[in-house]
Image: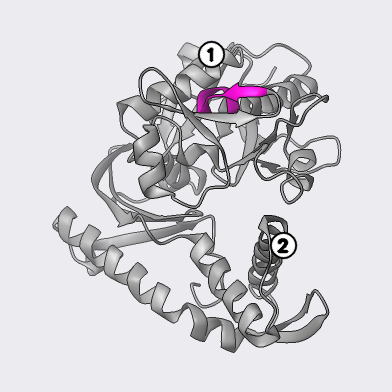
């Protein structure tokens, strides 16, 4: 029997101790599902022993809905039928989506209540329906690994999610056949994951780098309970900006610009790969179409320096909103996206 402790930090988990339940990180780029066995958190791996499931859904004609790695393989070939980063759109109006993300490759319709609907080869799909496909995939994985039917799940959501976005997440879970035991704010989840709920009381800063924006949460831990002092960030600064700088550098160095959506997607995938490699390596080989070159970590750090300065400015604003100084922060948790970059560490 897999157990999930769903209590405030430091409180008993007895009310749920007999449930077969999981925790789901429903991420913008990737998602994962985990449970607790014998008091230890365990990420549930897929049939190829992979922890992460890409948050990508493909609705191609004449085939079943594809989720995860299979969908990712079709992203460059069928950009309009392959929905990426749907979490950015969930709970938002079509007008808001088009204002925030004017260059999305999708065809949209508008629902009666003003929400976006994707036009795909399998028909019209809402962000809630797309999210539910990801949750169905994770549910199937969990039930296969645990050998039983799930009775509930805790799902993480950004601290800044409003009521509409939170309700849409619950609706997606319901559509996937999941009982939501609780929505857990991601900064709190990150702090708990690092065991900070059982440590010394004080102020904790959680920085989460997403694809399109940076989230900063200032938490205070007191008597086992996290209080959110302030949230902030930069809605126009995220991991994609790091990738685009690398992509622009490749185009400048090679003199070869992408000519269509497929080539653009391939260029971005290459940029993301280079960013990941430079977290550990001092340089990385670049092969782009018929051009070859090398990107050093030093050059990469120079490219992203303006972004790091903006990140620091966002941190200072959050500290000011919380009414504290940097010296008051006891712990810093950096999660996701581009935070593994060597210069960030």
Q: Is residue 78 left or right of residue 25?
A: right
Q: Is residue 117 left or right of residue 53?
A: left
> Which residue is at the front of the view, 14 or 273?
273
- Can the viewer see residue 332 in this picture? yes
Q: Is residue 124 magenta?
A: yes
Q: Quadrant of residue 2?
A: top right
Q: Is residue 278 above or below residue 210?
A: below
| Residue 64 x %, y % | 80, 24
Q: Earlier in the sequence, mark 2 or mark 1?
A: 1
Instruction: Label 2, secondary structure: give it.
Output: helix
Instruction: Label 1, secondary structure: give it.
Output: helix
> Which residue is at the front of the view, 100 or 25?
100
> Which residue is at the front of the view, 184 or 68?
68
Residue on which disc 2 sits: 263
- Crowding at dot 1, Cα within 10 Å, few <14 / some 14-19 / many 20+, comes out as some
Identified at 16% across, 55% down, the residue is 321
Q: Which residues are magenta?
A: 123-130
């Amino acid at each position: 029997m897999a157990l999930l402790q769903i209590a405030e930090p430091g409180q008993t988990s007895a009310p749920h101790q007999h449930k077969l339940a999981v925790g789901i990180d429903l991420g913008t780029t990737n998602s994962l599902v985990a449970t607790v066995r014998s008091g230890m958190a365990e990420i549930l791996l897929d049939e190829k022993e992979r922890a992460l499931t890409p948050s990508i859904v493909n609705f191609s004609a004449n085939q079943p809905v594809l989720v995860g790695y299979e969908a990712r393989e079709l992203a460059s070939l069928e950009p309009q039928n392959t929905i990426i980063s749907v979490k950015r759109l969930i709970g938002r109006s079509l007008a808001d989506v088009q204002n925030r993300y004017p260059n999305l490759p999708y065809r949209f319709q508008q629902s009666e209540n003003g929400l976006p609907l994707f036009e795909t080869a399998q028909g019209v799909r809402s962000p809630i329906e797309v999210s539910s496909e990801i949750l169905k995939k994770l549910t199937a994985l969990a039930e296969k690994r645990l050998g039983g039917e799930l009775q509930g799940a805790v799902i993480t959501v950004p601290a800044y999610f409003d009521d509409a976005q939170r309700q849409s997440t619950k609706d997606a879970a319901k559509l996937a056949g999941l009982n939501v035991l609780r929505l857990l704010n991601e900064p709190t989840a990150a702090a708990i994951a690092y065991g900070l709920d059982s440590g010394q009381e004080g102020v904790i800063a959680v920085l989460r780098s997403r694809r399109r924006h940076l989230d900063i949460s200032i938490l205070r831990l007191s008597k086992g309970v996290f209080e959110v002092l302030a949230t902030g960030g930069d809605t126009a600064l995220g991991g994609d900006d790091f990738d685009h700088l690398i992509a622009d550098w490749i185009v400048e160095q090679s003199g070869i610009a992408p000519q269509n959506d497929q080539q653009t997607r391939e260029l971005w995938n290459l940029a993301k790969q280079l960013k990941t490699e430079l977290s550990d390596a001092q340089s990385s080989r670049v092969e782009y179409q018929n051009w070859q070159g090398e990107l050093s970590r030093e050059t990469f750090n120079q490219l992203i320096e303006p972004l790091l300065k903006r990140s620091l400015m966002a941190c200072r604003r959050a500290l000011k909103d919380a009414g504290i100084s940097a010296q008051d922060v006891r712990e810093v948790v950096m999660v996701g996206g581009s935070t593994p970059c060597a210069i960030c560490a």
